[in-house]
Image (cartoon, rainbow, N blue to C red):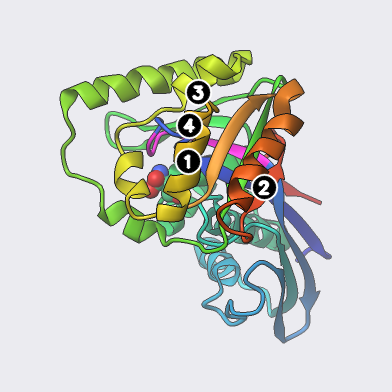
Amino acid sequence: MTASVRVRVPATVANLGPGFDALGAAVGMHLEIEIEPRRDSIEVMLEGEGADHLPTDDTNLVIKSMNAFFDHVARRPPGYAVRVKNPIPLASGLGSSAAATVGGLVAARSLTGRTVPQAEMVALATSMEGHPDNVMPALLGGLVVCYRGATNELQHFRLNVSERLVPILVVPRLGFPTEEARRVLPSAVPFEDAQFTASRAALLVGAMTSGAGSDILAEAMTDRLHEPHRLALMPETAAVHEELRAARLPVSLAGAGPSLLLIVPRPEAATRAEQVRRVCRERDAGWRVFVSEWESAGATEG
Ligand code: HSE
């Protein structure tokens, strides 16, 4: 068993608009986990988002995922004190569950000193969390394309986002459960909408990696597969989304929502953020706007 352990895991934005269940990117907002080995007791301390209501027993997502790792390697430490600092808004489309799941697994790996191949970590995290487009960038950083291979095994292709671009995260007062935002999706879509969205997803990967301008980004972040159905459930988000779209800003739902993501050229970031804040303020005082960065590192230890 090692000495103390520290792990940082980034928030992630899945889909990025047209990349439904396929694209995800890590951003510069980090869940932190610190663990001190103890002789025989377990203590869980929470700080930040959700600290006032999340459980501190083994139903806590970080602890659940640590336990899953301990079972996986058949090694369970006698005790520990774990402190989780979470700045990632919950149920908001910013990958808080993926960060907790990945964080718990990586922290448990560190604590036990067991070497587990990355592919196994990905499989463990995905089987627990269910959304590879959040889990992969949380673990690996960068912009990740997730897909299933011929025998349904999970594959990924990792890229770096251009330094010329900046993500802006726009978070409403209340979260929205992802399961509900999935339940509303149709079982089939018109061929034309599939073609429209495939072209935007391809354009988006090119635009994000090369650092395209706002016009291209605005076009590239348009989706017809899931956003129209989901925005219908989220009137607050839909209103802000519509207004930002009308102003020709590059905006999409963040993951399954209800937060929004803008991707803007770096020189425009401050002006755009102010413009977004104005739009949000007119509707509800509870919106938060974060000018963030891309995170290329993924989950880190030490
Ligand atoms: N791709 C998933 C969805 C992400 O849109 O439902 C969930 O965070």
Residue assigned mark 2:
289
Label the magenta part by its dominant secondary structure.
Answer: strand
Q: CA distance from mark 3 to mark 1?
A: 12 Å
Sequence order check, earlier mark of 3 and 1: 3
Looking at the rendered structure, the kind of residue marked 2 is Val
- Residue 104 at x, y percent in the picture: 62, 61
Q: Amino acid at mark 4?
A: Arg
- Mark number displayed over residue 286: none
Query: CB of mark 3 within 8 Å of CB of mark 4?
Result: yes
Please tell me which residue is depicted at 20% across the width and 45% down the height of the picture: 186
Residue assigned mark 3: 218
Q: How far apart are labels 1 and 2 at the CA level?
A: 14 Å
| Mark 3 Cβ inside 8 Å of ligand 1 | no
Residue sitting nearer the eye, 253 or 3: 253
Q: Amino acid at mark 1?
A: His
Within 10 Å of the Cα at label 1, are there few (<14), some (14-19), or many (20+) other Cα atoms? many
Name the N-terminal-most of marks 4 and 2. 4
- Helix, strand or loop at disc 2? strand
Q: Does dot 1 land on a helix, a strand or a loop?
A: helix
Q: Look at the image and give the residue range highlighted in magenta.
A: 20-27
- Gap between marks 4 and 2, in whole Å? 17 Å
Ligand 1: does it lie within 8 Å of the C-beta at label 1? no
- State whether residue 118 appears in this view: no
Q: Are marks 4 and 1 in contact (CB under 8 Å)?
A: yes
